[in-house]
Image: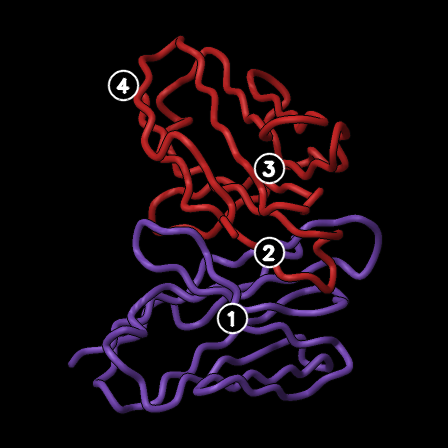
Chain colours: A purple, B red
Amino acid sequence: SQQGEEDPQALSIQEGENATMNCSYKTSINNLQWYRQNSGRGLVHLILIRSNEREKHSGRLRVTLDTSKKSSSLLITASRAADTASYFCATDFNSGNTPLVFGKGTRLSVIA
Amino acid sequence: NAGVMQNPRHLVRRRGQEARLRCSPVKGHSHVYWYRQLPEEGLKFMVYLQKENIIDESGMPKERFSAEFPKEGPSILRIQQVVRGDSAAYFCASSPRIATNEKLFFGSGTQLSVL
């Protein structure tokens, strides 16, 4: 299966700390995306990193991609209680009209 | 500028009934995707549609499930003769072009409960 696997499954940190989540996948990709889901809500796109990029920043978010290891990481710096959510990576197959495939997510709890 | 609209937000059905879930994509988006999510799980792809066409239905059960995205109106995910195992959150997403290199816009989902 192409499905990405996030690690850890759950993460609990104090407000102000950094949170790092990892994603591994199995086959070649065009790009990798990270999404966030608040409890009971739909997913919200955070950031897209292309296969020829190694690092990307957006505000307090930093994403890295290592295609040789087929892995990506999402770093949230100076976390806030409002960052509490589930975070998913999503990958596409490197061919054809295939949709995004999501992992099971990392549940992040930021304690104030 | 409305995002993806799904309705109903919650749907309760008894075993054997039919469930119809509706999704109106972002205006101007012609690609619609349906995903299913069980508690504490990720999203499982079900079907990908373009206006009037099913592009990929590899994630959809062969029986009882069908989807359409007509030229006019919302996309519909239809589940016939529902069973308890169909209870889940169903999310619809849309994009202006194929999802490769595009971000998806998600609706808030329909929570289906089968009694």
In the depicted view, which residue is nearer to us: A22 or A87? A87
What residue is shown at x 35% (from left), y 89% (from top)?
A: A18
In the depicted view, which residue is nearer to us: A105 or A36? A36
Mark 2 to mark 4: distance in Å?
32 Å
Crowd around label 4: few <14 · some 14–19 · many ≥20 (10 Å)? few
Mark 3 to mark 1: distance in Å?
22 Å
**Residue designated by label 2:** B104
Q: Are marks 3 and 4 on the same chain?
A: yes
Q: Are marks 1 and 4 on the same chain?
A: no
Callouts 3 and 1 close, C-beta under 8 Å: no
Crowd around label 3: few <14 · some 14–19 · many ≥20 (10 Å)? many
In the depicted view, which residue is nearer to us: B61 or B20? B20
Q: Amino acid at mark 1?
A: Leu
Tag 1 subunit: A
Tag 4 subunit: B
Horizontal and vertical percent for residue B42?
46, 52
Mark 2 to mark 1: distance in Å?
10 Å
Q: Are marks 2 and 4 on the same chain?
A: yes
**Residue designated by label 1:** A46
Q: Amino acid at mark 2?
A: Leu
Which residue is farthest front?
B1
Q: Earlier in the sequence, mark 2 or mark 4?
A: 2
**Residue designated by label 3:** B46
Disc 2 versus disc 3: nearer the observer: 2
**Residue designated by label 4:** B115
Q: Are marks 2 and 3 on the same chain?
A: yes
Horizontal and vertical percent for residue B5?
47, 41
